[in-house]
Amino acid sequence: MRKRVFSGVQPTGRLTFGNYSTMRHWPKLADDHDCIYCVVDLHSVTITRKPEELRNETRKVFAALLALGIDPDRDIPFIQSHVPAHSELMWLLGCHTMFGELSRMTQFKDKSARHATNVNVGLFTYPVLQAADILLYDAHFVPVGEDQRQHVELSRDICLRFNGRYGDVLTVPEPLIKGAGARVMSLSEPSEKMSKSDPNENATLFVTDGRDTIVKKIKRAVTDSDGAVRYDTENKPGVANLMTLYHISTDKPFGEIEREFDGRGYGVFKAAVAEAVADCLTPVGQRLNEYLSDAAQLDALARRGAEKASERAVKTLERVYNAMGFYKC
Ligand code: TRP
């Protein structure tokens, strides 16, 4: 039996090269895993959102899953709020999650500091909904970026606690973190993570950027005056970040990149990085636009994904209700 994979992406803002770096592995995983990928719209309302924007971005990110190569015939792409079992399981798991555990989540601490006027309960219980996502589909592996490791580990702890009380009801998940250490940083402030909400447009590469925009942004990226293409995140964070972009786009190891650009200067190097990034992103951007231009097809694919996901989710939820002793007739 093939192992199952589940992951989720929030429909907030445009997808960045950082998102691409995590999500590009998702279609490949389907060669030897049973894969379920979800646009986690419920997770995205812990910050206040305009209704029209939530709707549009959910569609866009769903289309992006397909554009990246997730195959609706083979995999299960769907939208979280279309499967009510997520919210239901969340309540049951919440009764097996400790206040202290949630208080220790670094994302909660960061986000509550950043949105100090809206520290809502959803922000606090966010990881319980994430555990429900993962456990509903009996996922063995959860491919995420390094920043989500703590949440997946909490899902694992909740799962072990639940199984400890009621027997082997749920599958114990583990995080699958590829390319750890190769974090994508801001082009203008390479000590900070590349962020979709950066007010400086030139700091962030978006999946939908055209070739010219990519060339322009990379040309302006911060480097240093030393002139050597060498991987040193501490002393040469700008160059190291451009090397990371090139590494993600070409799969070449850092040593090979150093040799390739030895003595050739930053102009040549930047041009090559921009070409490589554009070669990766522009086909995705094109397919994304194609999916978005056929609303009826996109809706049909979203409905089909939700049906396939529901079939599985409902079974797990039944198992959980039964294990806990809920009266069913
Ligand atoms: N919290 C994840 C993020 O911000 C998104 C997410 C929600 C997720 N549910 C998930 C990721 C389940 C993996 C599995 O990136």
Image (cartoon, rainbow, N blue to C red):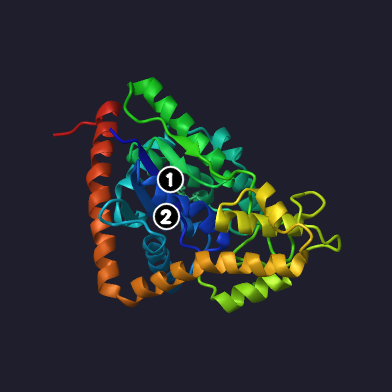
Q: Position of residue 207 (x, y in %)?
A: 52, 67
User: Along the horizontal axis of the image, is 233 left or right of 78?
Assistant: right
Quadrant (top left, top right, bottom left, bottom right) of the C terminus: top left
* Disc 2 Cβ-to-ligand 1 distance below 8 Å: yes
Which three-letter amino acid code belongs to the residue tagged 1?
Leu
* Disc 1 Cβ-to-ligand 1 distance below 8 Å: yes
Question: Image quadrant of residue 179?
Answer: top right
Q: Position of residue 88 (x, y in %)?
A: 33, 44
User: Along the horizontal axis of the image, is 325 left or right of 52?
Assistant: left
Q: Is residue 217 visible?
A: yes
- Residue under pointer 2: 40
- The residue sitting at 54% across, 43% down in the picture is 178
- Residue under pointer 1: 129
Rendered position, 119 above or below 224: above
Label 2 near label 1: C-beta < 8 Å?
yes
- The residue sitting at 70% across, 65% down in the picture is 269
The outermost residue toward the left is 329
